[in-house]
Amino acid sequence: MSFRYCARVVAKPLRFFPALGAVLFAGGVLNACGGVPGNAVVSVNGSPITKATFNHWMGVAAAATATSTGTPAAKPVIPEPPKYTACISHLEATTPKPAKGQPPTTRAQFKVQCEQQYKSLQQEVLGFLISSEWVLGEASSLGVKVSDKEVHKRFQQIKETQFPKPAEFEKFLTNSGQTISDLLLRVKLNLMSSKIQQKIIKSKANVTPAQVKRYYEEHKQRFEVPEKRAVNIILTKTEAAANKAKQEITSGKSFASVAKSTSIDPLSKTRGGLLPEVVKGQQEQTLDKAIFSAPLHRLSGPVKTPFGFYIFEVKSTKPGSQQPLTQAQASVKAQLAATQQQSALSTFVKNFKKKWKAKTDCRKDIGGVAVASAVADCKQYKEPKTGTTKTTTR
């Protein structure tokens, strides 16, 4: 589990996913609720996510949704509870007329669609804004810093890669409703997440020789190199055909010529029946047992298998061996380090979510649409008893 799980904001390409915005628009005043200030939707450790910020990103999310569905609009329509007037009017104007004999969609049905759209956008936006605050807060508590120089350098790299022409970038800003400040902060979050992850796993990268030796001794079978044999082989559909092919070879015909004229195995047939490296344990069980118990240079078979009848001759053998610790220690050390680091990250993510969820106060609702009980990152949220989980998309 990567730390990036905690900040889905940082894992998406710049072109397609918005960043935490610093743009504030005039918004309606909300009634205070618990630890949430009157002008906020959520408070994370005392830092408010204002209604204005929420509204801004609802617009960005609506624009992204419209683009992804192939119906971009000059100005995306945001479903606004509780009446959804603008959304309903937009749907009435843009929904195709029903087929002949079918009833038209009612305003009540359009309202249901708008409610569903709003809830989906709300989950996405709040999940995004809350997780962004969590990353910023965790970076501060760990002393992780990202300089403006680092942010601008990375931003320019992304911009030049995704938008070779300035006009393309300007069009992106216009269509997405974002600003350069939004995108810079998104890059900052990305860099912060990477630095936090490196800080967590750094202490777990030291694997001792004793740990390597213990793992090797406990998993010796993993370092066994199996026996290998080079085999000439012919596969036929019937036992009679296999016996006939065997008789032809015994009478003096070359194995290769008989394989090319008789075998139904396309892999070996083109090479005169030769399988240059058959690894013990990788063939069909009956055939595998026959090949690895047969003496060298003796025509054997037929061997019945689910695929047909085989005759074969073992040409050479390479005994199995045990890879020594001196050769295995590098791969063992890397594996142990990766396992320990992954475990450390998993533990960190679990504690990270628990810690910051406890610091995340959410408003009861917006326009009658639940927030605290609907968004899994809110400390007021409780898992539904029915097993149906309302969660943010992360």
Image (cartoon, rainbow, N blue to C red):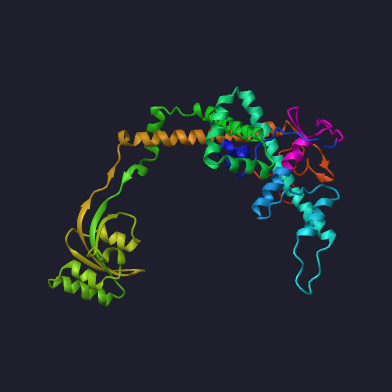
Residue 229 vertical position relative to residue 364 in the rendered view, above or below: below
- Specify whether 225 is left or right of 394: left
In front: 281, or 109? Answer: 109
Q: Residue at x 66, y 35 (%)?
A: 182
Single out the residue that lies furthest toward the top.
143
**Magenta stretch: includes residue 48:** yes
What percent of the width, then of the height, locates residue 390? 72, 47
Q: Does the magenta segment cover residue 115?
A: no
User: The magenta stretch spans which residues?
Assistant: 29-58
Q: Work out whether 307 lies above or below 196.
A: below
Q: Position of residue 119 (x, y in %)?
A: 76, 48
Q: In screen coordinates, is 198 left or right of 123?
A: left
Give the residue drawn at x 60%, y 31%. 188
Q: Going by the picture, which residue comes out furthest to the bottom?
A: 240
Closest to the observer, 289 or 257? 257
Query: Residue 20 is drawn in which quadrant?
Result: top right
